[in-house]
Image: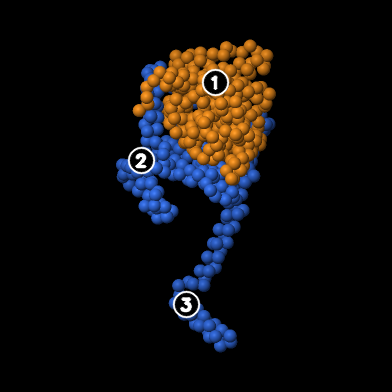
Amino acid sequence: MNCFASKWLVYQTFFQLSFANAPILERAMSLAMVGILAFVGALSLACFTKAVGIAFLGRPRSNAAAKAKESTTSGPDGLILAQVILAIACVMIGTSVPIALDGLAPALRHLTHDQFVIGSTLFPIPQGQLALVGGILVSSIYLFVLGGRSGDVKSYITWDCGFGPLSTRAEETGSSFSHPIGRIFSQILQLKVTTEISGKDRRHFPESVRVETFMTPILETKLYRPIMGLFDWLSASLVRLQTGSIHIHLLYVFLTMLLLVFLGTNI
Amino acid sequence: MIAINTEAILETLAFVATFLLLPPLLVGIIRKTKARFQNRIGAPLLQPYFDLMKLMSKGETISKHTSWIFRSTAAINVSLLIILAFLAPWTSLRPFNLGADLFLVIYLLALTRFFTVLSALDAGSAFGREVTLALLVEPAVILCLAAIGSVSQTSDLGVAFSFNNVSLINQPGLWFIAGCGLFLASLVELSRMPADDPTTHLELTMVHEAMILENSAANLALVEYSHFLKILILLGISSQCLLHAIPFFWHTSQLILALASILSIMILAASIAIIESVAVKLRWTKLPEFIAYSVAMSIFCVFIALSKNLN
């Protein structure tokens, strides 16, 4: 909720700029930014769904994961408590955005040189009330429609397309979740899938099937990595100049002085 | 406080009745039209209501691998969409003006999708492709609505879509393109034909249907109902855009407007059925090309909005 508030403010800034008294280029850029932000927003939606869904939901994929617990050596209650406190803080800020913005108002006044910035009016959406109404609606629907009949709920295995019980390996994994996205953006993500089928009469009765997927993000490998490599190389070679030895340092001082004297006498 | 008078009560009742009762009828219209296109008589128009009632009285089966998230998702989604129905300008008759902020509407829609995907992952099933589609149409939806908002100089959709907003009165081009763009985007968002075949029973090609495979009985009824509500809201928004493009509706009475908005939603539902009858489901890799139409329209909207505010 607090994340939505900050995002809303960013959106609103660009949006307001699009009809402000500004040059056409700036206004066009602001609407373009709204579009890009929308795309990033949808990407982050996919990312959060993946993070929550793959990490916390579904079945454990191995025995070790099934028995996973909080570490006992570092005090499990403290670990959980810290997260709970953080979550409560998020909800608190999310439901009281105007108050939080009021706290930021002095900084805003200083930055914008506008004495009339009032923090609490910047964010008009009643998030707290909306959350409350939503909570009441959810719980009432849950109680009246679903809760009353929990007696005749049967539990059964997840639908298996008729193949017999699914093993945990058939579950959605992190990479299979992002696979469709990789497919669509295969131009920049360079998704490669290799399949090996082996065994006699391997088309219909394969003995083993091996599928591997590789995703090489082209921007990262072809653009960012060389740039990062360049900086790594630069810093590695520059460090030879200054190794921390006082003698070399004195030598530099001496050489610079010589150079200056030389320049001073000749020019 | 809201002043209590008979007219306001009647309006509220009509509004609530519309958004509670219309969604299944829309699906009935879609199915009936498709059946007629295939030379079948088809199920009666009211069949979705009967289906929902039947589901409510069935015994429920859930996967033993699920947690509380799975069972509460349906309730969460229905309530999110009910809130959206009160906020979003899907019909011209809105008894309450609660301030439908553009980005709030979009993010509430995104939240419903988040929970739908989570419930699918919760059952440990192997499906969850809908987010990718959302990823592609999100910019188009936001840009169309932002262009309209930018011309009317407000991000409150309730104000931008009301029929007394002077800055938008002579913009049939903007409204028409935005309406078409939103309609194409909602085809994808609702998992209708070019993106997904809602009647398929082949798991490999399912998108939306695959995610609700595990739901049954009352839970499935809620999921279905929330999907119907989503159809109503998204089609409603695009039909409102198209209505605004016709100058006649700017100078007519409230009653005609309300009837016209309901009728236009039904016409859009029928046109979905026609599209589904003549088009084929696109391959996954071809989808961006289809969505590009919607994005292109939204960019045109942006250009119109920019030139409108030039002087």
Q: Position of residue A218 (x, y in %)?
A: 61, 49
Q: Quarter of the image holding residue A194?
A: top right
**Label 1 chain ID:** B
Residue A121 visible in the snapshot: yes
Please, what secondary structure does the residue beneath circle 1 have?
A: helix
| Disc 1 residue crowd, few under 14, some 14–19, many 20+, Cα 10 Å | few
Q: Position of residue A244 (x, y in %)?
A: 45, 72
Q: Colour scheme of this structure image?
A: by chain
Contact, mark 2 vs mark 3 (Cβ under 8 Å): no
Give the vertical position of A51 relative to A133 (above or below).
below
Mark 3: secondary structure: helix
Say whether mark 1 and mark 2 are on the same chain. no
The residue indicated by pointer 2 is: A96
**Numbered badge on residue B66:** none
Separation of marks 2 and 3 at Cα, in angstroms: 57 Å
* Circle 2: element type: loop
Who's blue, chain-wise?
Answer: A
Q: Chain of mark 3?
A: A
Tell me which corner region of the image, top left, top right, bottom left or bottom right, holds residue B16. Answer: top left
Say above or below: B293 vs B257. below
Percent position of residue B176, x then y: 62, 32
Mark 2 vs 3, N-terminal side: 2
Q: Which chain is orange?
A: B
Q: Nearer the viewer, residue A30 or A235?
A: A30
**Label number found at residue B256:** 1
Residue at (60% x, 30% y) in the render: B245
Q: Nearer the viewer, residue A45 or A240?
A: A45
Q: Look at label 3 and name its amino acid.
A: His
Badge 3: residue crowd in 10 Å (few <14, some 14–19, many ≥20): some
Which of the image's four quarters has the C terminus of chain A?
Answer: bottom right
Question: Which-is-in-front pick, marks 2 and 3?
Answer: 2
